[in-house]
Image (cartoon, grey):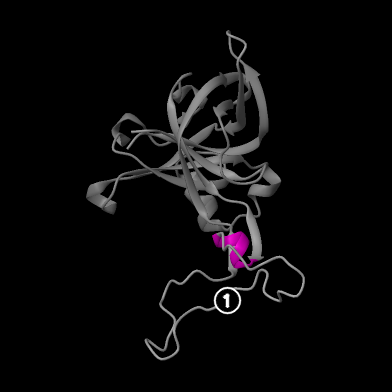
Amino acid sequence: MAIGLVGKKVGMTQIFDEGGRAWPVTVVEAGPCPVVQKKTREKDGYEALQLGFEALKEARSKKLSRPLRGHFDKVKVPCTRHLQEIRTDRGENYSVGQTLTVEVFQEGDAVEVTGISKGKGFQGGVKRWGYKGGPQTHGSMFHRAPGSIGASSFPSRVFKGHHMPGHMGAERVTVKGLKVLKIFPKHNLLLVTGAVPGANGGIMIIRKSG
């Protein structure tokens, strides 16, 4: 599995290529991410890098629990607001205390982005699952209701997993097939084609595909 970075969604915009074609892009603030811990197959059963994101000011870092502060102090890394693990089989190429930046990517790289999708609250079946609904005519009295959810005599129960109204969104989602169009190392910014999951300000993981 390829290495990646922890980042934050800034917003969306568009850029134009040399041929004048407009590309919709998402602006992602990615890194810098210090390597706080390495997980190894021998010790932990899997290989991963634990990355930090968004360094805390001294006053804020003092409010962390002592075990968590010690976790950062042990490797002489500044305390960060976020900690995320990224699975990788290339952990030997990185060392604890090393800082990863957007320069781990190159323009044109294929990437996949994992984040928490926007929460929609409690929604009915029409919006959540695409129910057709009933007639919209006056007097129908059946417009957006769920309708029948199973037979009465047999099996006399509702099958597990039946699509019903309920909480929608706020789920971990991975969008694949994206591409890095532009990199701004000075500002730690990536411009990624298309949309990525989550609202502006949401935390996400950007990984190289493959």
Q: Can residue 68 be seen in this view?
A: yes
Measured along the vertical axis of the image, is residue 132 above or below residue 96?
Answer: below
Q: Is 46 left, or right, of 73 in this rendering?
A: left
Residue 34 falls inside the magenta stretch? no
Give how far across and how far down residue 53 sits, in percent: 56, 40
Q: Give the range drawn in magenta.
A: 123-129
Q: Is 29 left, or right, of 96 in this rendering?
A: right
Secondary structure of residue under mark 1: loop
Give how far across and how far down residue 186 sits, in percent: 61, 19
Task: Please tell me whether the stretch drawn in magenta is mainly helix, strand or loop.
Answer: helix
Q: Crowding at label 1, few (<14), some or many (≥20) Cα neighbours within 10 Å?
A: few
Please report the residue visible at 70 percent of the width from the left and 47 percent of the height from the top.
Answer: 59
Measured along the vertical axis of the image, is residue 84 above or below residue 96?
Answer: below
Give the camera-side residue of 53 and 98.
53
Q: In which quarter of the image is the N terminus?
A: top left
Hey, which residue is sitting farthest left in the picture?
A: 42
Please report the residue visible at 49 percent of the width from the left and 49 percent of the height from the top.
Answer: 173
Q: Is 96 left, or right, of 24 in this rendering?
A: left
Quarter of the rendering containing residue 146: bottom right
Give how far across and how far down residue 200 sits, in percent: 67, 42
Please report the residue visible at 25 percent of the width from the left and 48 percent of the height from the top.
Answer: 41
Give the camera-side residue of 97 and 23.
23
Q: Say which amino acid is labelled 1.
A: Gly
Hey, which residue is sitting farthest right in the picture?
A: 138
Measured along the vertical axis of the image, is residue 131 above or below residue 82?
Answer: below
Residue identified by numbered label 1: 147
